[in-house]
Image: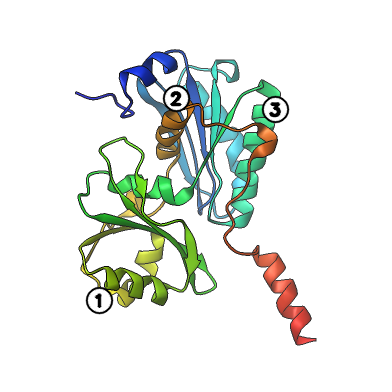
Amino acid sequence: MGHPLGLTQECTTWLDDAMILGIETSVDHVGVAVGDYRGIRAHSMLASDRRHAESLAPMIQFVLQQADATMADLSAIAVDVGPGLFTGMRVGIASAASLAWALELPVVPVCSLDALAMNAEWSDNVVAASLDARRGEVYWSLYRMRGVGVEPLRLTEPVVSSPEDMAVHLADRGEDITCVGTGFIRHAALFEDVPWALMTGEPHAFPTAQKVVVLASHRIAADDTVLAGEITPMYLRAPDAEINWLTREATQ
């Protein structure tokens, strides 16, 4: 039986004493997870109704207690940097940066679409991961899965587009596609011409803190981390507040 996080023997040797805190705030849900070489030790998810800032700190404390751990036990902080909800992303990134500064820990930035694709880890098809970006747009990217618990291989870089453009791109591929995420759930009627298989149900609709930890474990073992001040959000488009301001200026 393979390692619960999908790690090689070399990785587990490095991670024997490592504990990772994963933070997920790029979607409507807030998620926190703690994992080590044995797998995910504790996790929690809350439908926040955009109250990310109020929810996150208590959830971190709760998950650490459930894992019988403290802040001093952490070896790294992993955080979803988007694309996703701008306010939620900023809350997660700011919290991760603050903890990393205070504890002098490395940070692993994780793309929300990479984590979302992990929900289809058993698929032999191309996997399309998409999140509803609102304003009539979706975030999306394509992947090949490389095994349970193993980081997926990106076939395309994350982009933002209309759901119609995404549907045309997928149809043009002419192959079976496993689809995950709220982008497909909201715009399902557009994909009648795509040979797709939608993974339905809430667990497949959004990225989770558990998957953020799994992805981070591979990158930490490869020494692919950043300092607290180097975390960069993956916006893909201007924040909504900026768009609203530019729109108002254009109409005056």
Q: In which quarter of the image is residue 151?
A: top left
Numbered disc 1: secondary structure? loop
Numbered disc 3: secondary structure? helix
Q: Name the residue under label 3.
A: 101
Q: Distance between the residues labelled 2 and 1?
A: 42 Å
Q: Kindly identify the amino acid type of the residue bearing the numbered disc 3.
A: Trp
Of the residues under marks 1 and 3, which one precedes in the sequence? 3
Disc 1 residue crowd, few under 14, some 14–19, many 20+, Cα 10 Å: few
The answer to whether the residues at label 1 and label 3 have Cβ atoms under 8 Å apart is no
Where does residue 110 sit, x and y in percent of width and height? 50, 42
Residue 51 appears in the rendering:
no
Q: Kindly identify the amino acid type of the residue bearing the numbered disc 1.
A: Glu
Where does residue 51 sit, x and y in percent of width and height? 60, 50
* Residue shown at the point (36%, 18%) measured from the top left: 10
Residue 192, label in figure: 1
Q: In which quarter of the image is residue 213?
A: top left
* Residue shown at the point (63%, 40%) measured from the top left: 231
Q: Quadrant of residue 67?
A: top left
* Residue shown at the point (20%, 62%) measured from the top left: 176
Q: Mark 2 points at which residue?
A: 221
Of the residues under marks 2 and 1, which one precedes in the sequence? 1
Q: Distance between the residues labelled 3 and 2?
A: 21 Å
Q: In this view, does 184 lie to the left or right of 45?
A: left
